[in-house]
Amino acid sequence: MSDSNTTSVMTENWVQIGTVNDIPLRGARHVHMGDKTIAIFRNADNKIFALEDKCPHGGCPISNGIVHDNSVTCPIHNWVISLETGEALGADEGQTLAFPVQMNGDKILLSLSLK
Amino acid sequence: MKQKLVIIGNGMAPGRALEKLFDTAPDQYDVTIFNAENRVNYDRIMLSPVLSGEKKFEDIIIHGDGWYIKNNVMLYKGHKVTNIDRVKKQVTSEHGEVADYDKLVIATGSNPFIIPVPGHKLAGVLSYRDLDDVTAMMLAAKARGSAVVIGGGLLGLEAAAGLKEQGMDVTVVHLMPTLMERQLDPAAGYMLEQELESRGIKVLCGANTKEIAGESKVEAVHLDDGTVIPASLVVMAVGIRPNNWLAQDAGLEVNRGIVVSDNMQTSDPDIFSLGECAEVGGVCYGLVAPLYQMANVLAANLTGDKDAKFVAQDTPTRLKVTGINLYSAGDFADGDDREEIVFRDASSGVYKRLVIKDDKIIGVVLYGEAADGPWFFEKLKTSEDISEIRDMLIFGQNAVLGGANVDPLAAVTALPDSAEICGCNGICKGDIVTAINEKGLTSLGEVRAHTKASASCGSCTGLVEQLMTLTLGNSFDANAIQSMCPCTDLGHSEVRRLIKAKDIKSIPQLMQELEWKTSCGCVKCRPALNYYLVADWPGEYVDDYQSRFINERVHANIQKDGTYSVIPRMWGGYTNSKELRAIADVVDKFNIPTVKCTGGQRIDMLGIKKQDLPAVWEDLGKAGFVSGHAYAKGLRTVKTCVGTDWCRMGTQDSTGLGIKLEKMMWGAWTPAKLKLAVSGCPRNCSEATCKDIGVICVDSGYDIHFAGAAGLDLKATVVLGHVDSEAETIIHIIALAQMYREQGHYLERIYKWADRVGIDEIKAQIMDNAEQRQTYYDAFIFAQTFAQVDPWDERVSGLDKHEFNPMAVLELEAAQ
């Protein structure tokens, strides 16, 4: 999960927020960052994703949803959000902010700049 | 920037127009709807089956609440628009809601015409237009008594048949000499009259109503000729009037209806109108097919396709009264330039008449045997020359095509692609076959969703299924089971059976053995599978919390702003000063903004932050409170009255029974929520007869009820049976709950489960089969040894801490 310009970015923006085991498999946690809340997801393949914890539909915290494949379903009106892009899938339209995530061993690094 | 589209009215025509609009241009408009009726869009054509009891309201909903949310439609229910300001381009509702529009659609429908005879305003005089009328009629019918239906047209006769089904003594009063004179010739009208009379409905033709008599409510109907018909209910079904006053007030051009061009535009280019209130080419329409055509034209014009134009077409008529086959279309008046072919069979009650002009069919009336209707109508529409087949024509399609009645599909096979299958929606055979092939449709539901065929009145469902068999071959089975979700082809019952048969004890094992199509399921199947495994393998299966909805994961109810509500258990609705003091202290300590009494006799604290939940529970736990499971697909409340402790009417210790039931059953997971009530006497203060399971105590013992509903559906319970002792009551109720736990589909309330498996089957197993009853009872009690753990206490002790606390809190020094 690393790419060529990792090093230069690491020094500026990446913040360690915890380890993979802090998040239940097919589950989510959240991170407070100022007045923003970021939802951190772990899917069945142990991939980690970060989205603003806000459904593009009604603003509900999507970290409360059910995680399946590479998506999460919002518990309020069942919108399905892509964990990779933050976009609403299916017939719905909208997008929530997606943040880059890096792994260092089992440690999760979150970038504060947008994807 | 999206344009603002405001629609006044939420009937079938604007509903269809929006479907088309969202299909072709989902992003063009922000849509706001004002609906004077306090409900979603439903199928008005199907009100008659609701009145006769063959269907329920839920069956005829076209767009549920979810549809409006999904399409971002702002729907104001129960808001009547009182003013259109064309200068400011604004509409105002009676409640003062104001909405701006770029484009406005007036779809206010029609009002029933009420004959202004003396007494027309008496209580008990109804019209027949919407669900409120049907509900009022059904209520009136409960008292049995006599009803008079004024008007012997399509609606009046459907109302009469429905009221007769509901047990009323019905008389139809019709001004003209024969029934349904606009759709039937006198001969068919006479046959229809005979048929209705034979069903016990009195028919008086050529009868003019002089007065509706009564002091404060209807007592009788007086006719011109002096006849007096006693009646407790009068239904006026003598016609409709386009509801055009709003347009008139706004200064739009109005004739009988709101005048629109053939692209549905009124005299104001930004205002459109459609439906029964619109007048196009000098004609107002009332049947669904032309209204749906208007909807298509409107949707096309709203998206800029100015070529879409309304073209007047004949629409066939059918009467929706079970057992009466009637079909009519076109023009069947007598005339010098016309010939007719008539077939009568008095013994079997068949009458067919074709009106022919210049070797073409121009009118069809069929009574008693109407299957050939669409075939004749096709010839009428296409002006086919019938001189070649004239000899055999009246005997119908099979006779003309020479096919014997062997292959049931022969008739459908022989239809041309242009033959109309669904009259309501104007869907032809070719449309359906193409959709099945191109979109790979395999179920009736899919065909309805994609083509709308048979999605309105449903009378062509058989034809659509035949077409599916024809197109898909044997792979289509009309009785096939709906799959659980797109991850599998198996239905819920099949999955439940296989879990037992194959000894499946985990979700990954299940997905492997039952060949799930996705890697880890979806939001529909995972919670269902988790429930099935929890219910089937108590003590063995490890509950997968990531397959539970958030409410069950954090043991509180999520609210729309992401905060939670907390409801502690109050056994049987009883509390005391110590508990109330503890609640008051918690509310103060955590600044809980809202405290409310629930319908289940408990106290709800709303607006609690997720991270505060464990601390709130800790304080409540110290006062003896446990989780009320108000968030669970499981046992919720057992509502009680004050019973023999206090009430002079009480017959048994109903409160004690309620509390015993709650103590034995709390913690149990069920397919959907389970609410109980126990009433101490038949006055039923705890409202036990609309609960999932209810008990009415009587002098001689206990009446056990179940399968009621008082939510989306309103449904009285049915009686499971009577038992003599409290101990037996408990065993029967717990056995019933266990049977439901083992058989119910996830999210299927007990009344729906009972509908599916049959009340008689449930009675047979619970009331009549003592061994089976004991087996269910024992299984429930065993499962409870694992389920009765207070989830709040567990979390106060530190379980699932990750659910409540942030993973990290980051300081933002230089966020930008």
Image (cartoon, coloured by chain):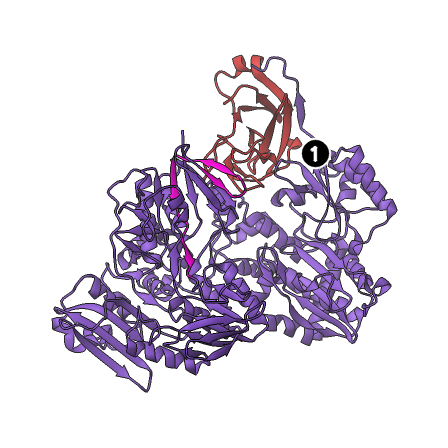
Chain colours: A red, B purple
Q: Residue at x 48, y 17 (%)?
A: A4
In this orientation, which residue lies closer to the viewer: B41 or B527?
B41
Give the mark count.
1
Does residue B496 appear in this view?
Answer: yes
In this orientation, which residue lies closer to the viewer: B163 or A26?
B163
What percent of the width, then of the height, locates residue B288? 35, 58
Q: Residue at x 68, y 39 (%)?
A: B564
Instruction: Work out whether B451 lies above or below B615.
Output: below
**Snapshot quadrant of residue B328:** bottom left
Which quarter shows the N terminus of chain B? top left
Tell me: B700 left or right of B69. right
Could you classify mark 1 by the number of other residues whose Cα lies within 10 Å: few (under 14), some (14-19), or many (20 or more)? some
Question: As shown in the figure, which amino acid type bears the numbered disc 1?
Answer: Lys
Tell me: B382 left or right of B700. left
Instruction: Work out whether B36 lies above or below B810.
Output: below
What percent of the width, then of the height, locates residue A115? 49, 23
Magenta residue check for B747: no
Q: Residue at x 45, y 78 (%)?
A: B201
Instruction: Work out whether B705 lies above or below B618.
Output: below
What percent of the width, then of the height, locates residue B806? 68, 29
What percent of the width, then of the height, locates residue B290? 31, 55
Tell me: B682 left or right of B147. right
Per the rendered image, the range of residues in magenta is B91-113
In this orientation, which residue lies closer to the viewer: B406 or B487?
B406
In this orientation, which residue lies closer to the viewer: B801 or B374?
B374
For disc 1, the marked residue is B609
